[in-house]
Amino acid sequence: MSKNTRQLIFIDGVGGKRYMRGKFVRYFEQHGYSVVCFDYRVSSQSFDEIQKKLSELLTAVGSQGDYHAVGYSFGGVLLRSLNEQLEPHLRPRRAVLLASPLRAMRLARRLRHWKIYRILTGECGQFAADEERMSKVPMLSIPCAHVYGTWPWLGAFCFFFGFSLPHDGMVAAEEAIPSSQAQAIPVPASHAFIPSNVHALRAMEQCFAAEA
């Protein structure tokens, strides 16, 4: 569809809440997009169950025409995990990985044995802490931008690792950037609120608007 691609899927993170993405939905609807949001329950669903549901959604939307996708936090891991499973014509035309870890997270590794963390994040939380599992998730084979936060004050990261490296309170910047050659866009936002951050919204919209 080229410049007429107006379907957009937002794949939420482990602890995502609907009110936290309200501005995201409104912003892109005002820019002419039809936005579909993907939710899941990590406390009662396995990784495989969530992945299957997402695959069904992407297939359904993709069968209607071209679309873009935003994978927020662990939502980006889920999107990448389906990269080689979806037929090429059913994959997003472009994607943004929004504050999404590309390797095992320091914070998840630190908390993985905490009971409250295990209850709240389920198998997905353990997945994010597992170097081997995360390393096997392929990168996307479609045009992709990486938008990540650099406002560290809201989130648990600073309490365990301080401010010695850039992070958004949850994900270290180096965990969200694949290489120096990748399209990586830092924005002054904390992890929890980056979906509603005006700088992040503009960066994502520009990534989609750059479609040839």
Image (tube, rainbow, N blue to C red):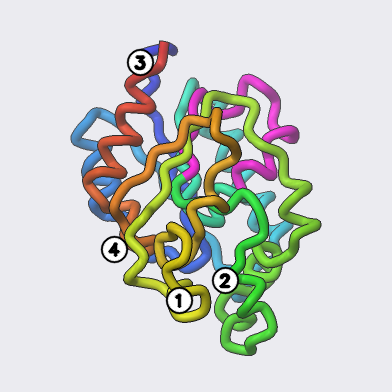
Residue lying at the far bottom in this picture: please name it. Answer: 115
The residue type indicated by label 2 comes to Leu
Residue 183, compared with residue 57, is above or below; it is above
Give neighbour class at mark 2: few <14, some 14-19, many 20+ (Cα, 10 Å): many
Q: x, y percentage for residue 66?
A: 48, 21
Q: What stretch is highlighted in magenta?
A: 78-97
Mark 4 touches mark 2? (CB < 8 Å): no
Say the numbered circle drawn on residue 4: 3
Say the numbered circle drawn on residue 19: 4
Mark 2 touches mark 1? (CB < 8 Å): yes
| Residue holding disc 1 | 156
Give neighbour class at mark 4: few <14, some 14-19, many 20+ (Cα, 10 Å): few
- Which residue is found at the position 69% from the left and 44% from the top? 81
**Label 4 – label 1 distance at C-alpha:** 21 Å
| Comes first in the chain, label 4 or label 2 | 4
**Label 2 – label 1 distance at C-alpha:** 8 Å
